[in-house]
Amino acid sequence: MLRLAVPNKGALNEAAQTILKEAGYRSRKDSKELVVVDPENSCELFFLRPKDIAVYVGEGTLDAGITGRDMLHDSGAQVEEIMPLGFGASTFRFAANPGAFASVMDLKGKRVATSYAGLLSAYLGEQGVDARVIKLDGAVETAIRLGVADAVADVVETGTTLRNIGLEVFGEPIATSEAVLIKRTGTGDSPRVQQLVRRLQGVLMARDYVMMDYDIRVERIEEAIALTPGMEGPTVSPLHREGWVAVRAMVPRKGHQQVMDQLWEIGAKAILVTAIFACRV
C-alpha cells in the first residue's frame, strides 16, 4: 500500500491533485477530507499542511509526499527529493522599504522576519551575515510597518503583494522553489513508489510533447525525419498510394506549429497533431 502525503491547501493543492488525477490516482471530492483510500491503485492519500509534509515523511510511515522545495529545505527533516514536478515555481527573496537596503550584507545587525526561519538562517550563515531572524507563522508583509522587523524574507511569485504595501525586493534571490516529490532519506524506492514516479514522469512528458502524424513522399522521408526524429525514431508505414509513407512521431509541444510549417514546405500532407494524455518512455 502506497502512503502518499498531498498538500491540503494553498498554491500547491490544486496542481498536486491535478497531476495525481492525470497519473490515474483518485482525488478527494470534498476539501474537508483528510484521507482518501484508492483501492484500485493500492494507495492512501493523506492531505496535510504543505509545510508539515516533509516532517511527516521524514519521521512517520509515509512513503512519499508532495511539497515545495523551499518547505523541504526549511523543515530540516531527514528527507530527500525524488523528482521535480514542474509546477508551483516561486522565488524566496528579501524585501524592505524602498532604498533601505541594497544587498544581504546590509542586513548585519538587523531584524529579518520570515515564516521560513530554517531556510533563512542557513542562508545568512552561508553569507556570513549576523542578523536576527524573527519567525512568524503566515504572512510577514506587515512586519516592517508594525515595527517587528527591518526587512522580510518571503516567497515571491509576482511581487504584486509586496509592491501593494510599499515594499520592494532587494539583493540576490535566496532560493528558487517548485513542487517536488520527496521520500525519507536513505530509504529505497518500493515498487509502489517506483510506479508513482513512472506515472508522474509520463504525465510530465505528455504535457511537453504532442503526437504528430503526416504523409510524405518516399524521396523526402529523410528530410521529414530530420524534423521529427521522435524519441527512439519515428514510425514509418507504407501507404496504399505508391511512393508515399505515413509517419508518426512525438514532437515537443513548444514549436510544433513551426514543425508543421516546415513539413508542409517539403511536401507533407494530412499533417495532424493530437494531445498525449499520458505515456511511458
Image (spheres, rainbow, N blue to C red):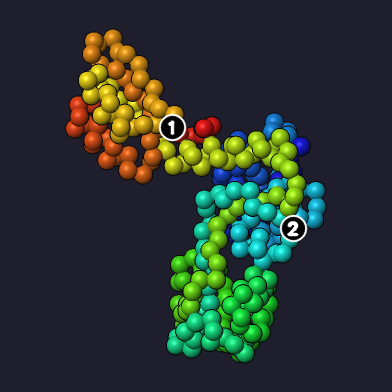
Tell me what residue is drawn at x 22 percent, y 20 percent.
219
Tell me what residue is drawn at x 35 percent, y 20 percent.
236
Tell me what residue is drawn at x 42 percent, y 38 percent.
209
User: Which amino acid type is marked by label 1?
Assistant: Met
- Could you tell me how far apart the alpha carbons at marks 1 and 2 are, in whole angstroms? 37 Å
Image quadrant in which you'd find residue 241: top left
Q: Position of residue 54 (x, y in %)?
A: 71, 57
Closest to the observer, 17 or 187: 187
Tell me what residue is drawn at x 54 percent, y 84 percent.
105
Q: Position of residue 138 (x, y in %)?
A: 64, 72
Pointer 1 residue: 231
Q: Position of residue 50 (x, y in %)?
A: 66, 59
User: Do we see residue 271 in this rendering?
Assistant: no
Please identify the quadrant where the N terminus is shown: top right
Name above or below for residue 71 compared with residue 35: below
Side of 200 relative to 270 (left or right)? right
Name above or below for residue 61 compared with residue 165: above
* Number of marks: 2
Image quadrant in which you'd find residue 126: bottom right
Q: Secondary structure at mark 2?
A: loop
Q: Position of residue 189 (x, y in %)?
A: 71, 41
Judge the density around disc 1: few (<14), some (14-19), many (≥20) Cα neighbours within 10 Å. few
User: Do we see residue 91 in this rendering?
Assistant: yes
Q: Which mark is residue 3?
A: none
Name above or below for residue 168 compared with residue 205: below
User: Which amino acid type is marked by label 2?
Assistant: Gln
Pointer 2 residue: 78
